[in-house]
Each structure stands twice: as structure tokens, then as C-alpha cells.
């Protein structure tokens, strides 16, 4: 008997979720931020299944974005920022791909990307803002006219109009909405009814999920209805938004998951060294992605010592005294 009957049709493995919802050429939005709550477990599975030509759209991201790009899964990227904090102020494989012309790339500000997802969530084709006026974001376009003919690419980066409600001359930017095929998030909790709760900063995760056609949520724990209904103002997404739920403890490693575990500086330093060299990066993928058959094997490979070292104080939300160099 399924102990979670309300979400029985949504519970699946990482392999099943990728096969069912992720296609070559999919436009995918990633939750999390730099080294916080990246959905790494499913990112590794996407790489293992060798999905190609992904059109990635992110508010800002880090490790997940870099692994996908480095593994050759990404064709096109729209983003505000990609970095791993002190370990890579600009994600290393991301930077190499841009310098080598290996991916198509368009950049917006953090606020502009948030607004674009908000427009998609509201069912609006575009959204107005004054953010970006006077900046080079309006002077440079990354996509060619040929790329802009693609169905999921806006036919222009932005449009400037005069505010029709102001008698004075006032320019307003119109930004195109984003409606990803799939949004992938990692959360601390999913209730047995499918309600999602993200603790700490949610970034643009909620807007990305509401804008997307399909939503995949990996989580640390599945909790009783009675638990998820406590403090309902802390819940992030209702059940009807969610298409797939996968319980994967430490599913954000080596990035952190507030109140559960901190980011792993040992692994991130190892990744930094590997990502800077093409041969070493191939070895990294062979060891940590292709050479690992499941998330459980990945966790076992990390080892209990490292997991205990990054275990978060449940009150503070992070790991006091963690050596972060």
C-alpha cells in the first residue's frame, strides 16, 4: 500500500522524472542560487541520460548551470548571473563556453529575469519596468536574428515605449515573459498532499514554477499533512503546480540546503580545480556523474565524514565553524 496516496501518481525516481519530462531542446528553468539549493541530484541524471540542446533560463545559478554546460547539455542560455561564490565568481565551464562560442547567450539583470518569470506566472506576454535604463544591457544583444526565429526565443530582447499615463516624457522598458517547458526546484519539504515548502530565501523559484508548463521538485523530506499545515504562510507552492516529486536527501550537494546542510567547500574546491582544465573536467564527470549509478551511490561516495562536517545547525540554518577556504 502506498503510504502517500494523494501524491502516488507524482512520486517517481530521478530516472523516471527525466525520461518523462526532459527532452532534447527543452527550455528549462533551474531553482536555487549560486551555491544554495541547486537541484544537483536531477542535474546529474540529466547529464547521465545525455540530454542535449537545452535552452536554459535562470534567475541566477551556479553549480547546476556549470555542470550542465560543461557536460555539453546546453545549447542556449538566458541568465542574470552564474557563479559559485568564492569558489568561482564566474562559473568556470560557463565562462569557457562563452569565450569559445560554444553556447548562445543572452544576459539580463537579476531583477529583469525575476520580472520575466513573474510575467510568465501572471500569464502576461510582457512586463514593464524602468530597471536597465541607461545601462549597456540595452546596448548589447546576445542572440542573432536567426536564433530569434526559434519558437521559445523572444523576437527581440526588449522594447522601449513612452509611459502612456504620464504627461511628461518617460521611457519604460517592456521585457518578454518566460514560460519554461520545465522548472526544476529543490526544496526542504514536500507534504504528503504535495504542498512544497522552501525554507530560507526562495529567490525566483516560486515565479519560475508558476510560469512553467511542468514542475519537478526534489526534496529532503516528505512530511505529514499535519506538519505542512503548521505555519501555512511558510509554504511555497500548492500541490496542483507540481508534476513530479522525488525524495533525495542531500539532493542539493555540493550546494547547501538551509537548515539541513551547508555547501561543501572540499567538493567545491575539488570541482574548481577540475573545471579549469578540460581533461580534468572529463575525469570529474567520469568519476562523479557517469561513474555513479544512482543518487544513493553518490551519497555513499561523498562519505559520512563529509556529510557530518557540513550538517547544519537546525536553528541557525548553516554550519558554524565550517572551514570555507
Image (cartoon, rainbow, N blue to C red):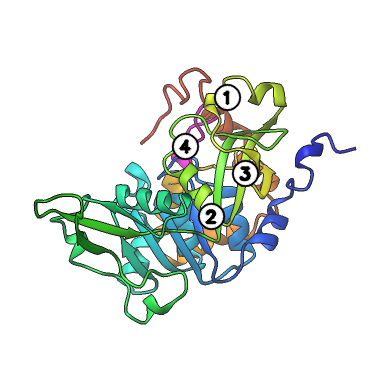
Q: CA distance from mark 3 to mark 4?
A: 17 Å
Is mark 2 in CB contact (under 8 Å) with mark 1?
no
Residue 216 disc label: none
Q: To which residue does mark 2 refer?
A: 212
Q: Nearer the viewer, residue 86 or 213?
A: 213
| Residue 267 visible in this rendered orientation of the protein | no
Q: CA distance from mark 2 to mark 4?
A: 27 Å
Range covered by the magenta-colored residues: 255-266
Residue 155 location (% of width, % of height): 35, 73
> Which element is circle 2 on?
loop
Most extreme residue toward the bottom, as rendered? 146
> Which element is circle 1 on?
helix
> Which element is circle 4 on?
loop
Decide: is 78 above or below 122: below
Q: CA distance from mark 3 to mark 2?
A: 16 Å
| Label 4 environment density (alpha carbons within 10 Å; few <14, some 14–19, many ≥20) | many
Q: To which residue does mark 4 refer?
A: 263
Most extreme residue toward the right, as rendered? 1
Does the stretch in magenta take in 115?
no
| Label 2 environment density (alpha carbons within 10 Å; few <14, some 14–19, many ≥20) | many
Q: To which residue does mark 3 refer?
A: 218
Most extreme residue toward the left, as rendered? 168
Sequence-wise, which precedes: disc 4 or disc 1? 1
Amino acid at each position: 500500500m502506498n503510504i502517500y496516496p494523494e501524491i502516488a501518481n507524482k512520486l517517481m525516481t530521478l530516472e523516471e522524472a527525466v525520461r518523462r519530462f526532459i527532452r532534447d531542446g527543452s527550455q528549462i528553468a533551474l531553482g536555487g542560487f549560486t551555491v544554495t539549493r541547486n537541484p544537483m541530484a536531477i542535474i546529474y541524471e540529466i547529464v547521465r541520460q545525455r540530454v542535449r540542446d537545452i535552452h536554459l533560463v535562470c534567475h541566477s545559478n551556479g553549480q547546476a548551470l556549470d555542470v550542465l554546460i560543461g557536460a555539453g547539455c546546453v545549447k542556449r542560455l538566458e541568465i542574470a548571473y552564474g557563479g559559485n561564490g568564492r569558489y568561482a565568481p564566474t562559473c568556470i565551464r560557463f565562462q569557457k563556453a562563452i569565450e569559445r562560442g560554444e553556447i548562445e547567450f543572452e544576459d539580463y539583470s537579476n531583477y529583469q529575469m525575476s520580472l520575466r518569470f513573474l510575467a510568465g506566472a501572471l500569464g502576461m506576454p510582457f512586463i514593464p519596468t524602468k530597471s536597465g535604463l541607461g545601462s549597456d544591457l540595452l546596448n548589447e544583444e546576445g542572440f542573432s536574428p536567426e536564433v530569434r526565429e526559434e519558437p521559445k526565443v523572444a523576437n527581440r530582447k526588449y522594447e522601449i515605449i513612452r509611459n502612456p499615463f504620464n504627461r511628461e516624457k518617460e521611457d519604460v522598458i517592456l521585457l518578454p515573459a518566460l514560460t519554461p517547458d520545465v522548472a526544476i526546484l529543490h526544496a526542504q519539504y514536500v507534504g504528503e498532499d504535495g504542498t512544497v515548502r522552501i525554507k530560507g530565501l526562495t529567490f525566483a523559484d516560486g515565479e519560475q514554477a508558476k510560469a512553467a508548463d511542468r514542475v519537478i521538485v526534489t526534496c529532503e523530506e516528505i512530511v505529514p499533512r499535519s506538519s505542512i499545515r503548521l505555519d501555512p504562510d511558510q509554504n511555497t507552492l500548492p500541490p496542483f503546480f507540481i508534476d513530479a516529486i522525488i525524495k533525495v536527501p542531500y539532493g542539493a550537494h555540493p550546494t547547501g540546503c538551509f537548515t539541513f546542510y551547508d555547501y561543501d567547500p572540499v567538493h567545491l574546491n575539488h570541482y574548481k580545480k577540475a573545471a579549469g582544465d578540460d581533461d580534468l573536467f572529463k575525469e570529474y564527470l567520469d568519476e562523479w556523474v557517469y561513474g555513479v549509478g544512482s543518487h544513493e551511490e553518490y551519497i555513499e561516495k561523498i562519505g559520512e565524514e563529509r556529510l557530518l562536517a557540513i550538517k547544519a545547525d537546525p536553528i541557525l540554518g548553516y554550519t558554524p565553524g565550517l572551514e570555507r577556504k
